[in-house]
Amino acid sequence: MESLPITIDSVSKSYGTYVALDDVSLDIQAGEFLTLLGPSGSGKTTLLMALAGFVRPDSGKLLLGDRDITRLAPNKRDIGIVFQNYALFPHMNVLANVAYPLALRKMPKAEARRRALDTLARVKLEGLSERNIAALSGGQRQRVALARAIVFEPRVMLMDEPLSALDKNLRETMQYEIRRLHDDLGITTIYVTHDQREALIMSDRIAVMNSGRIQQIDTPQRIYDRPSTRFVAEFMGEANIVAPGLVRRIDGADASRATLMIRAESFHLDEKLVGRDGIALEGTLRAKAFRGENWLLTLALDGGGQEVLVCIPAALASGCGELATGQRVTAYAPAAKVHPLPETIA
Amino acid sequence: MTATADPALAADALRERRFFLSLSLPALFIVGLAAILPILWIIRQSFLTTGGEYTFGNYEKVLSSGLTWSALVTTLELSLATLAICILLGTPLALALASARPRVANVLMAFVMLPLWTSILVRTYGWLVLLRRDGLINAALTGSGLTAEPLPLVYNFTGTLIGMVHYMLPLFLLPVYAAMRDIDANLIRASSSMGASLGQVIRTVILPLSAGGIFSGSTIVFIYTIGFFITPAVLGGGKVNPLSTRIERTLSTFQDWGSASVLGILLLIVMAMIGVMFLAARRLSTRNGAAHA
């Protein structure tokens, strides 16, 4: 199956005074798995629906390969879509749902049936082809929706929070299966989610959106470790944004003048675990919580009282249980994990 | 192991169910008084001579009369024609309303509902003003030279049909509109994204999913129109005689309660048969709909 790159060129969309998409540009490579990540109202679903053809942009261009699809009708775009609520046809059984796009293309019945059954086997739904949609579990419906979106070999696949209605365990299984399916088919995929873990696990690249704009687009690891804005830093995980004056270098050299982003889990309580070029933060313990795999400590820093979250893996935190609130604590972080926020560098 | 049921709790449950059932008693009482009793009385009347003796004569007289059968045919013709036009006009209108933006849909809906707030008599005479030989429509047609002679729009089948469609369209529209509005917009998007043209979306998704509403609307139209009286009486000009006007004439002209009762029972039977047919058709269609594409 030939997959195509997607180009989103300065696309804007407003509803009255509300700006849903604010001059968004984005290039997605052929065969890439790209996630649009953001809180609700950030514009990610609007962007997806614009690509599908259900939202008409006010301005800008959308290209599939080198074909301009900005004004193309949705049914001519050849894009497979998995909807948040699955959007399975309740008046058709599983097989008819999956064979539906083939029937629209006037494929002979026997061949359409064979193709639909093959695709159902691919998403591990053998033997359920004659079931009614109402008789399926949430996970099975999800698989039918997947099968229906890929059976007609579209060149692009769009997924709108497809796993948000599933419970946690099933969601994790499906994350790996969707990714595996993507790798098998090599189909260009744009995936929308508000779950940052899901985005990290599944994506080649993540585009973080907020208020109709793309804040940052990069690989999961770089988005997580090297966020370019405070919003991205905080949206991706437990981030501490620390003003320059509150930090000291362990070796006594001058500390950075930029505002720093340090993830809660980058800290250690043992100076020896951090190199000489690492940093130290001193404060008093405000609160502590045991979260199973780790301890979460809240420190109030000396000089201003800014609170910092420190996350210590339970396996390394033998002393955490004995710490009492009000006690003095010093947290250390290695230089590699201390990230100056670009937006704050003048 | 299940524990032994506590009889006190079971009694509570029973009392609760009885209380809710008892709420239906006032309505049941009215229905019994206003509907069941008169029907029983009509059935009894149909077997009585004017002298008050039991007889099958009324049935023989009515069922052997050509007028009865032509009235039945007229009744069915009017109902079927009204239904057909309601489906043809109402289904696209419902689709337009269901896909319009909420505010536009509300305004359009108010226009559709307007006739329902007006008395049927006022509306029927309103049509008379519009449709008669020197009425507004014919005046416009002849005045503009579109037709040389006024068109026979009223005091005939056409006029009756216009009046009946006008009355029934909102009642047909409501259930169809409700069914279409309830269709998840994502189903239509999904269908379209997989390559369906607008026509294919309507045929494979919208119509099957609003079939229930269309059936309900059709049932309402049929049941109502079978017993229509004022519209044929006024707009039919004596030339359109369904069962309802025959019943009225039998009573007002001949004071023949026995024959009128037989005609009434005939009307009831036709209505019941059509009701059963609609139910059967509906059951059949939902069963098929679930099984195939």
Image: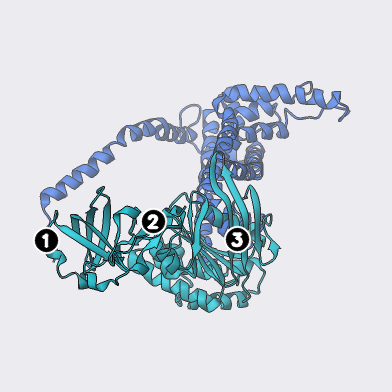
Chain colours: A cyan, B blue
Q: Are marks 3 and 1 on the same chain?
A: yes
Residue A64 at what x, y percent from top left? 65, 64
Judge by depth and name the residue closer to the eye, B82 or A214: A214
Q: Is residue B26 visible?
A: yes
Q: Is residue B208 visible?
A: no
User: Which quadrant of the view contains residue A27?
Assistant: bottom right
Q: Secondary structure at mark 3?
A: helix
Amino acid of disc 3:
Ser
> Seen from this angle, which residue lies furthest front?
A253
Q: Return the mark for residue B193.
A: 3
Q: Return the mark for residue A127.
A: none
Q: Chain of mark 3?
A: B
Q: Which residue is mark 2?
A: A257
Q: Is residue A300 left or right of residue A326?
A: right
Q: Which residue is mark 1?
A: B3
Q: Is residue A194 left or right of residue A12?
A: left
Amino acid of disc 2:
Arg
